[in-house]
Amino acid sequence: MFKLSELVRWLGLTEFEILVNLCGLLVFTISLAFKISGTLNNVLPEVMCDWFSIFSPLFFIDICNAYFCVIVGIRMYLDSDNKRKALHRFMWSTYFLVLIAIFKYLLCLKLSGKTGLEYSEVFSPIFVLLQLVAVRACQLPNSI
Amino acid sequence: MTLAHRALFTWFIVLVFLILLCLRLDPRTTWNWFVTFTPLWFFDCILIIYVLIKFIRKWRNLNRLTDLLSLYKWNIVGVWLTITSQVMICITLEYPQQIPIYVTMAPLMLLLCTAIVYVGGKLRKREGWLH
């Protein structure tokens, strides 16, 4: 449905960020499979009991992406004549990362049973992010 | 369809799916998981039609089927693995403990590996990695 370049344009993520996200998701999927099957429960009981350990690859990629975005933001601001564009990109990346991180944190709390929030409340950062993504979709040129 | 139309269509499908998922996860409904995944099935149908149209439009210019398949291998593998992953996840959620979790996760892991290879290949070509 979408080419990679179109996704980059729509979501405002670079190819590198998408690659890092995919790698993190793969590691998370493997650790989730271990957690559900209980294969490593005897070997690593503390790690396998805690949902935050299972979600750690996803938090790690958030930190990597945040570092990447800060570097790109600073370089764009210093090198480019269009400071507004650099700030705009930095703000979008910040919104994206913060909302995703909040969602993962709330999901971890919910799965650990440490909070009484409902799933609709846990998913609220994703709904906010979806609104922002919709705004970006509306800003896309009609000629492509 | 322009990029904006495709993006908004995808956005709408994801939104409806997330709403249905929230309703299903909170104990408000006891729908079948296959019903919860309806927006994604609809999206898959559109995806298949989209790939088929691309396939048929190219068919006129290429004589051999192998050429066509190699040209659209990423699209075909991507769509096939996406649908398989969704079916496996639905079956596992609907009938828990029936299928080993590794079998459920295998198509998803394969899909992610394929996506990593695809994106990595694109980046390597553009940035000249490992040259």
Image (spheres, coloured by chain):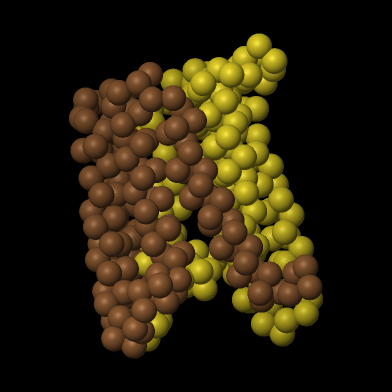
Chain colours: A yellow, B brown
Position of the N terminus of chain A by quadrant: bottom left
Taking the image as shown, residue B80 lies to the left or right of residue A105, namely left
Front residue of A69 and B73: B73
Position of the C terminus of chain A by quadrant: bottom left
Taking the image as shown, residue A72 lies to the left or right of residue B24, namely right
**Would residue A65 be seen by someone viewing this image from the given angle?**
yes
The image quarter in which residue A13 lies:
bottom right
Q: Residue at x 36, y 79 (%)?
A: B64
Residue B83 pos. (x, y %) = 34, 49
Taking the image as shown, residue B36 lies to the left or right of residue B102, namely left
The image quarter in which residue A116 lies:
top left
Q: Residue at x 37, y 35 (%)?
A: B89
Q: Residue at x 45, y 71 (%)?
A: B70
Q: Residue at x 69, y 17 (%)?
A: A44
Q: Is residue A142 above or below residue A54?
A: below
Residue B55 pos. (x, y %) = 31, 74
The image quarter in which residue B117 lies:
bottom right
